[in-house]
Image (cartoon, rainbow, N blue to C red):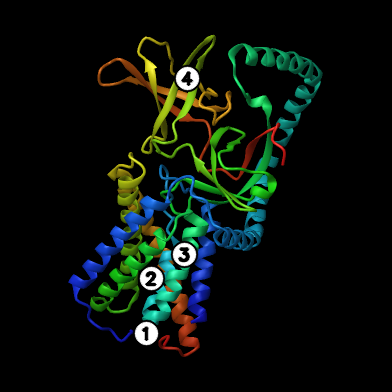
Amino acid sequence: MSVAIIIVVISFLLDALVSNHIGYTLTDPSIFKTIFTIVSLVSIYPYFNNDKKYLYILIVTGILFDIIYTGTFLFVTLIFVIIYFVNKFLDFFLPFNLLNINILSIVSIYIYHIISFIILNLVKYNSYNINLLFNIIVHSIIGTIIYTTVIYFILRYIYNKLNIKQIR
Amino acid sequence: MFRNKKKIEGKYIIIVVVILVIAALVIYAKTLKEDRKLNMVESLIKDSVTFVEKIVLTPFNYVSNLIDDFTELRNVREENEKLKTSIERIDAIETENIELRKEIEALKEELNIDYVLTDYEYLNATVISRNIGYWYNTLTIDKGSKSGIEEGMVVVNSTGLIGKIIRTTTFTSEVRLITTSDTNNKISVSISNGNNKVNGLINGYDYENNLLEVEGISNTEEVNVGDYVYTSGLGGVFPSGILIGTVESITTDEYDLAKIINVKPSADFNDINYVAILKRKDIEE
């Protein structure tokens, strides 16, 4: 489990690091921008046979994301839990391989953006239009694929080396 | 394939997701108010993680700054010549400044303005992370309440207005950018065209064209493309005289009664590494 936690921690810090060096505004999103924390959580999921342990990591990460990056209270945590349930559902139909893990990552990033967009428009702000959402989700595809692929190979290499098939 | 997969009924997943979305909506509506303060535990966690982040980011920022410095070296000779000319004028500028300060004091009394830009001192800070949640339009900076920063303080950089402090911990603060389309945060502005000055309100932000929308200006007022837009000081949040941008285009509302001014922000919100927080000189730390 420690490998999975290290991957999530590195991704969490990577979110801060990358935000300082590439375009991050809603007006001009970079094609290499994604939410590394979400991608890492999706990528480690197939290695967990114990959903409780996975949920524990997911919720703690969500709470930290809430406190440190968005200043919200349990909002991102809930989105992460929604992503977990959707992935759990899709995981049944999709065998574990590079293509499918990429699909799950992209779906998860889309869920994050779509829910944020809907709730922000309903609750607080009034002028995010749908084109903005499309622009952001289109721009996040390349970054998501690159990072998911990198993590997929890193995890596979490490777990093969350690001869670990699943986290119980 | 590693997991022992168990089929879950789609309808249960949909029910759970819908419940979670509703919960998120309720929680968000309740808690994401601008004045929501982080509690002690949250502040402690944020300070600790930000400290780790700063350590991790330092070598990367160092390399990035080195590259920037190397690029800037090419222009050093030209800049040096400019600076030499400026130094020769410094005495004359200082004398002019003394006179201007007197004039400002006289005008403040006459116009009944409490604070102008000269009543503030600058507290420099470095940006630690920028808008990670994507939809929140915030920056995290490395100065907090320990440095005397308070909620509501104004944040600028060398090119103009950036935003204001919305949340502080002991060692960090969060800045909400002026590009946030929040109807609760209208900024009063003055559009300056030589001797002519017109007041309006920033009412929104056009994300597609990167333009701030200024409203509340009568169609009879004269405003031209290229005019400078500053904070007016009305409303008490932002001091007067901070550059926001320049007028990019002018349209009218649906009744043809009022102007809608599109303003190009002077600050590049994609490239903010250092900021300054305006702190009133009469506030003791």
Q: Which of A163 and B190 is in front in this view?
A: B190
Residue marked by disc 3:
A63
Specify which label sits upstream in the sequence, 1 or 2: 2
In the current view of this chain or complex, which residue is farthest to the bottom? A163
Q: Mark 4 points at which residue?
A: B226
| Callouts 3 and 4 on one subunit | no
Q: Give me the C-alpha separation between circle 4 and circle 1.
A: 62 Å
Task: For marks 4 and 2, give the one nearer the viewer.
Answer: 2
Q: Which mark is residue B92?
A: none
Q: Of B107 and B203, which appears nearest the observer?
A: B107
Asked if the residue under mark 4 is in contact with the one under mark 3, i.e. CB atoms within 8 Å, the reply is no
Which quadrant of the view contains residue B153? top right
* Near-viewer residue (A108 or B155): B155
Q: Which residue is drawn at 74% across and 18% down?
A: B97
Q: What residue type is labelled 4?
A: Gly
Question: Circle 3 — which element?
Answer: helix
The answer to whether tags 4 and 2 share a subunit is no
Q: Where is residue B197 in the image (x, y as percent from the top left)?
A: 50, 13
Q: Earlier in the sequence, mark 3 or mark 1?
A: 1
Q: Which amino acid does label 2 sit on?
A: Val
Instruction: Out of B192 and B248, give the one closest to the viewer.
Output: B192
